[in-house]
Image (spheres, rainbow, N blue to C red):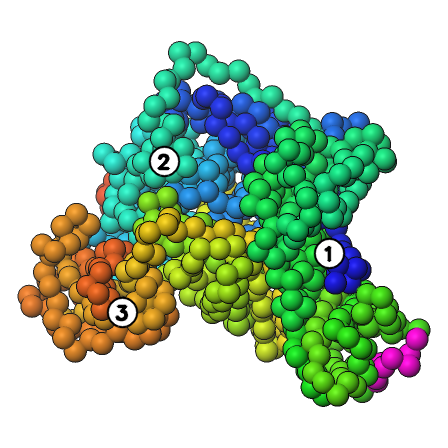
Amino acid sequence: MVFAVVLLLLNALGQNTGIKLDGNGYTDIVVAINPAVPQNEEIINQIKEMVTSGSEYLFQALDNLVFFKEVKILVPLNWSGTYERARRETYDKANVIIDYPNPAYGDEPYTKQMKGCGEESEHVHFTPNFLLNDDLLNAYGPRGRVFVHEWAHLRWGVYDEYNEKEPFYMFDKQVQETRCIGEITGQRYEVINGKYFRCRYDETGLPTKECQFFPDREQQTSASIMYMQSLDSVTAFCSVMEHIAEAPNMQNKKCDNKATRTVIFQDSVDSDALQTLTPLQSSPPPPTFRVIQRRHRVVCLILDVSGSMQVLQEDDQSTVGDNVIFLTDGEATDDIQSCLQSAVDSGAIINTIALGPSASKMLETMAVLTDGKFFFADQSLLSNQLVDTFSSFTVSDGDPTKQTIQLESTGRIINDWFNGTVPIDRTVGNSTTFTIIYERSAPTVYIQTPSGSVYDQNDQTHVTHNAAAKTVTLNVPGTAEPGDWKYSFLNKESTAQTMTLTVTSRAARDDVPPIMVKTDMKKPTRDGSKPMVVYAEVSQNYLPVLGAKVMATLESDTGHTETLHLLDNGAGADAFKDDGIYSRYFPKAQNGRYSLKVQVIHQGGAISGSPNRNSGALYVPGYIVDGEVQLNPEKPPVNVQPADVGSFTRTVTGESFVASVPSGVTPPNFPPNKITDLRAEIQEDTVLLNWTAPGEDFDQGTAESYEIRWSEHLEILQKNFSDANPVNTSVLQPQEAGSDEQFSFLSDVTIQNGTTLFFAVRSEDKEAMKSEVSNVAQASKFVPTPRPPAISKPGLNLTAIVVSICVVIIMVCLIAFVTKWAMKRKKAREFVLTNT
């Protein structure tokens, strides 16, 4: 079995060590440049300048508490020059990436956030053009300020305080800009063909979608960085004293209406440190930078611990940055504990595989301490777990066209025929292989292309049989034909035997990124109040792939198996709808080591569109300077068209994890998950509510009942939910988790024009365990009044009107005077002519 999987061994995958807070300074920040970016030393210079100025800005913004101390810049292998050798840093685990634009965002800086409020995010994305083109700075602000804005997303899990889809909202019968602080002054204008006009308003009383807010260039307020860091006066994060909790921005929606500064100091990964650190009495030193580069990797498969490091040193006398895959079943005499320290000191990335339940518990520790990955694999051929594990060792340097992608992994106990279909989509096709592993004797093999051609074991050019490894492999020549490939394997024995099939491929073309799948787990919260979460990201060239069926299978070494249908609906464990990240809680974990396998199926049709933007610096359209509008260059439009690449399948194996319930402790029984997508609307005196149904145990099963309450005051629902006005929900029966819920009711009181009401929901399970109170939804009633249709230009205020009227009066008087004078002169001339 080991020999069979070695044939499928690809490159090893490593991780970086993660950001650390060393005293008051952040270290181990990794900025990685994509290999597609042409070599340009000015990019390195701009990164250094951005982080250095950002360090000064961060130090001021957080009360002289923290700064950027040490940063590593990872340049691609294809850049020439003398750079320091990278240790365990890799592109796919970098905190900041420099790459060509996400097609949906263009040159906009943004942060990929897929988890919850207060949790660290995946990475920040800057483009080379953003670093090199100063024309963008007026709209976004200096790069150092933008870096701190994105850092707050990345490190502290806070969100933007503006909302491009809802830039204005109605509150207290007044139109408000969506933001954290109300003291930022400015004007609302529409820009049409480079000219600006006063905004129009629609039937809801809000400005039309063409309306934009233009801030005054000179401001008196210091907040807020998560709203408009481009303003010179802005040097602080929004605090609870100035926070507008009613604004419909992502910070309020995702963080329970908390101020940004509150989340940073109370809920983030640095909350404990920030509350105990002593402010520095003087400015910190500038960051130190190390420009590093990975060398060509040496990958070593180890079946025991003796002599492994000597093997790695044979190429260049160093083990730094090399990759180890250490597989053991625990039945040998390997003393992993004794070699643990030398493994850590080696600088090599050590990935460990526990083959069966007897393997050492130290394997996970070794992987963690060397920034490797830990996997558990069942020894049975049927599970195909060992094959899947080796197939997952694919390192990403940022170029997906060079990666091997697993399309299919399946196994069966076969009496006669093993039949099935594997779709090959138009994004893959090169280096395509079908590998059959059998238990005892080779089957008869038939593999049919979409056009009808057949490969079988008689085709010795493309089909090879390795009797020692018990494998039959088809290497498809050239680029595999897109469409459905059908396979049939006949067991020629009289008794049943186990067979497995693994299909892998690579990108069809260098200029077409393939559809990729990544999977990850989020561990339970420290207080045990929330269970594990399974994630799977399905994307193509940064764009989300929508409408896929994503199934996760979790198997433990004690025999427990759970299958989860992951969802991209923005509810339950899923942070954002339609971002291509499919999620689900895993509340039923038992003691043991778990493997994680995700299978993705898409049955054709459009696969992607523009994602819902969730985190990134605001592009300011212009500023008011001395009463005049100074327009910034128009934001370049992005136009992402849905792509149809045909049906596809993908299979990925995630890192294994260990679930542990203390001895004698009953596994936790979880309540329904918090509803996070409650929406409200008022139509005359009827309130309409919509949300996604929670489950009995978080997002599993069906809840027992709902409790709905409303108030005219947001704080009552936030702090004293039970004191708010109740709604009769006796006719409301919860549906299965993930279903769309709708409920309408007549208010007990007459809703006046201009009134804003707030609503929240709490669910309960059969054991009377209550969920957290939902997000607070708000709705306003507005009865439109007639408005003049004309668009007036800015500056046409009362003074201008008075001046205009005066000018008209003067002109009328002048015309009257001239007319009267002309008439007198005419009469005089007629008198003279008559008398002569």
Mark-to-mark CA distance, 3 and 1: 43 Å
Q: Give the residue at mark 3.
A: 703
Measured as percent of width and height from the top left, residue 323 is found at: 73, 42
Q: Quadrant of residue 781?
A: bottom left
Q: Which mark is residue 85?
A: none
Residue segment shown in magenta = 453-460
Residue 497 in the image: state x and y as whole percent. Answer: 71, 79
Could you tell me if residue 586 is visible in this image? yes
Task: Specify whether 469 is left or right of 218.
Answer: right
Secondary structure under the numbered disc 2 in the rendered image: helix
Upstream in sequence: badge 2 or badge 1: 2
Q: Compare residues 515 and 407 and report the one nearer the observer.
A: 407
Q: How far from the left and from the top, in percent, is residue 422?
A: 69, 77
Q: Residue at x 29, y 34 (%)?
A: 239
Q: Residue at the spot x=91%, y=79% of the render?
A: 459
Q: Quick check: is 89 in the magenta stretch?
A: no
The residue tagged with tag 1: helix, strand or loop? loop
Mark 3 burial class by Cα count in 10 Å: few <14, some 14-19, many 20+:
many
Tell me which amino acid carries mark 3: Ala
Which is nearer the eye, 312 or 427?
312
| Picture coordinates of residue 708, whole percent (x, y) | 17, 64
Name the mark nearer the viewer: 2 or 1: 1
Query: Is residue 776 shown left or right of residue 145?
Result: left
Mark 3 or mark 1: which comes first in sequence?
A: 1
Instruction: Check residue 264 in the rendering and tell me which mark sits there, or answer none.
Output: 2
Q: Secondary structure at mark 3?
A: loop
* Prevailing SS of the magenta stretch: loop
Horizontal arrangement in the rendering, residue 317 relative to residue 128 (left or right)? right
- In the picture of the structure, the residue carrying the numbered disc 1 is 403
Residue shown at the point (57%, 42%) measured from the top left: 362
Q: For the residue carrying disc 1, how many other residues have a C-alpha within 10 Å: few (<14), some (14-19), or many (20+)?
A: some
